């Protein structure tokens, strides 16, 4: 079922991809994008690193709106993280934040932390921010 999402106060329609629970496509001016990629304002290359799928897989999903099994788990996990982080920081800055070196991660970018399989470090940071615990 289509739902509405907003980015920069512009409403767009989002449609879930059949067989991929929680993965939706938005269409803006005739161009289709994965909803999370659109919200984060990321190029396919960077988003592919974030969810561990190839640029080709992203292009296929966005052009055909067909299921690519490898996307499901990583996409949903990163979407949940972004939704949670949006509770404590401005969601419009998340795309840039993922690709910016961060002292909390020894100078690594959050996307690099995820690529190393250490997404738990980002979740820990979120819980500390939400609870007000010092880092």
Image (spheres, rainbow, N blue to C red):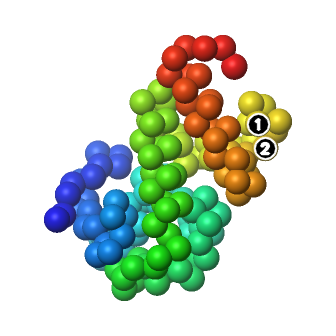
Residue 9 at x, y = what percent?
29, 45
Question: Picture quarter containing residue 91?
Answer: top left
Residue highlighted by disc 2: 108
The reply to whether callout 2 and callout 1 are in contact (CB within 8 Å) is yes
Residue 101 vs 3, above or below: the answer is above
The secondary element bearing badge 1 is classed as helix
Indicate left or right for 20 with 2 as reference.
right
The reply to whether residue 92 is in sight is: no
Residue highlighted by disc 1: 105
Residue 69 at x, y = what percent?
47, 76
The residue at the point 46 percent across, 84 percent down is: 60
Q: Quadrant of the N terminus?
A: bottom left
The residue at the point 61 percent across, 76 percent down is: 54
Indicate left or right for 65 with 1 as reference.
right
The reply to whether residue 18 is in sight is: yes
* Tag of residue 1: none
The residue at the point 52 percent across, 40 percent down is: 93
Indicate left or right for 35 with 135 as reference.
left
Residue 62 at x, y = what percent?
41, 77
The secondary element bearing badge 2 is classed as loop
Q: Quadrant of the C terminus?
A: top right
The residue closer to the viewer here, 64 or 124, is 124
The residue at the point 41 percent across, 66 percent down is: 34
Distance of mark 2 from mark 1, alpha carbons?
5 Å
Q: Residues within 10 Å of mark 2 (few under 14, many from 20)?
A: some
């Amino acid at each position: 079922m289509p739902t509405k999402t907003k980015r920069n106060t512009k409403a767009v329609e989002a449609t879930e991809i059949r067989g991929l629970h929680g993965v939706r496509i938005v269409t803006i001016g005739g161009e289709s994008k994965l909803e999370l990629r659109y919200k984060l304002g990321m190029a396919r290359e960077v988003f592919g690193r974030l969810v561990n799928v190839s640029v080709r897989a992203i292009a296929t999903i966005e052009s055909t709106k067909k299921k690519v099994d490898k996307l499901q788990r990583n996409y949903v996990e990163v979407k949940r993280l972004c939704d949670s982080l949006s509770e404590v920081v401005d969601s419009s800055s998340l795309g840039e934040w993922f690709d910016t070196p961060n002292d909390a991660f020894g100078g690594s970018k959050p996307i690099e932390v995820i690529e190393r399989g250490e997404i738990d470090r980002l979740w820990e940071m979120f819980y500390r921010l939400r609870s007000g615990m010092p880092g």
